[in-house]
Structures are given as structure tokens and as C-alpha cells.
Image: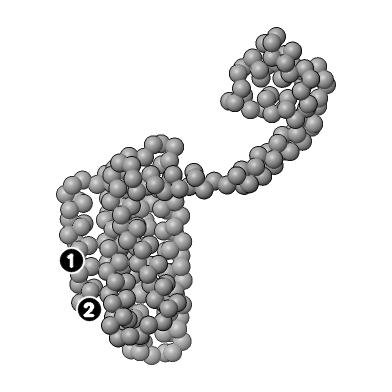
Amino acid sequence: MEDFYRLYQDLPLPDLVKVARTPSDYLPEAVAAAEKILRERGVTREQITAEEWVIAQKEIADGLRRGRLREYTAWIGELFGGDRMTPKTDRWLTVLLIVYALYYTFNMFVVIRQLAWVLRRGDVSYGGSLLVWDLCFATYITICLYCVLKQVWLGWSLLLVHAVVFTCMKLSLLFRVYAHHNFFLPVYFSQIVMLLLFAGAGVILLRPYVQATFAITDAIRNRTLLAAAFVGLATLFF
């Protein structure tokens, strides 16, 4: 500790606080020396707190300036690449839940708005088939969200069927728009984006670490893929 004590004696206050308050980044002897010097200088707790705030703001600014693109691209690469994710990057489940919760909220808003529109007209026969579809879809995604939150296999199966079916629906829609020359660039582009999102979701759900989280056996996976393929192909013809 004596070596660090002599080395740190002339350090400015911010550097001493940084050493004393981040013990995971420094040797125990260095931390003890910094704390001893702070006591000898008579630095109050309020002064230390103020310096910690300044240091935190500087670190945030430096991080934003450097950017975190490499970290995010590495994590995205691991999503599609590695057979198994490490515990530190097990954040994919949190991201999945957040994204699906936003998707669920948006679609429930659409369903409620369309239900209100039909009831306002007072003629349920007009738009009745659309209303039935909306209610069935709302029930489906509600069950799906519940099962995903519980991390049971049914949630994984419903999600995969959902992703495959909607991928096929977007493909069918794009083909029909192209075949009838009803080409409108913004709509066409938005449908392509949705197609890629659903297809990407299907790829992620088939990763081994995702299947392990939901305890998916080979039998469950095969039956789910068969059901998804059957329903997905049916959407291409109707």
C-alpha cells in the first residue's frame, strides 16, 4: 500500500474518488491508499458524492461519443450465430418480451378501435367477418403472450406459427400486388419490412438457446413446424 500511497499523494480529487469508488477496476492496495489520502485531506461525503456525479456524467458522455455500435452488432451476430448464448447475453428473452408486448399492445388497440367502429355503425353484419377475425386474433396473441411470460412450450409454438403464417401472408400479398400491377412504393416497402421482421423472428425462435429456454423437444419442434407449414401454405392460396 505504501507504494500506491506515495504514487497517489499528488493526484487531484476526481482521480482519487474514481479509484476509491470503483474497487472492481483497481487493486485493493490502490483503493485503500486512495481512501486514506481522502481521509487525510478531510474530504467530506458531500464532496465525494459531487465528484462521483461528475465522473458518471463524463463516462456517459465518453460512451456516447465512442458509440456502442460494435457491442450491439456483436450481440446481434450472436443471436443468429452461436449455438448457445452466455449468461451475460441472455438478454434476448427480455428483448423478446418487450418487443412482443409492444406488438400486442398495438394490435389490441387496432382490434378495440375496429370493434368500436362496428358497434357505432349499429350493423354487425357489415364487417362481421372482420370482427370475428379480430377477436380470434386478439385471443390468439393474448394466449401467446401469457405462455411466453410463463416460458412454456406452447408460447414458443404459437410464436413460431405466428411468424411463419404472417411471413407467408406478406409473401402472398406482395405477389398479388405485383401481379395486378397495383404498385405503391411506400406500401410495398412497408410490407417488405414486415416480411423481413417476421422471417427474422422465425429464425431466432429456431435457435438452440431459445428452444432450450422453452424446453422444446424434437417432437414439439417437428409438430410445430408441420402445423406452421400447413397453415402458412394455406394462406398462400386464400
Check disc 1 and give the amino acid type: Phe
Check disc 2 and give the amino acid type: Phe
Q: Is residue 165 visible?
A: yes
Q: CA distance from mark 2 to mark 1?
A: 13 Å
Mark 1: few, some, or many residues within 10 Å (few <14, many ≥20)?
A: some
Task: Please provide percent x and percent y for residue 149.
Answer: 38, 51
In front of the other: 216 or 9: 9
Numbered badge on residue 230? 1
Numbered badge on residue 78? none
In front of the other: 147 or 186: 186
Mark 1 element type:
helix
Q: In the displayed structure, does residue 152 sit left or right of residue 224?
A: right
Image quadrant in which the C terminus is located: bottom left
Label 2–label 1 contact, CB within 8 A? no
Mark 2 element type:
loop
Residue assigned mark 2: 238
| Among the 4 quarters of the image, the one containing residue 128 | bottom left
Mark 2 or 1, nearer chain start: 1
Task: Please provide percent x and percent y for residue 182.
Answer: 35, 85
Give the answer, above or below, for where 45 lies relative to 94.
above
The residue lying at 35 percent from left, 73 percent from top is 135
Q: In the displayed structure, does residue 71 sit left or right of residue 218?
A: right
The residue lying at 67 percent from left, 44 percent from top is 61
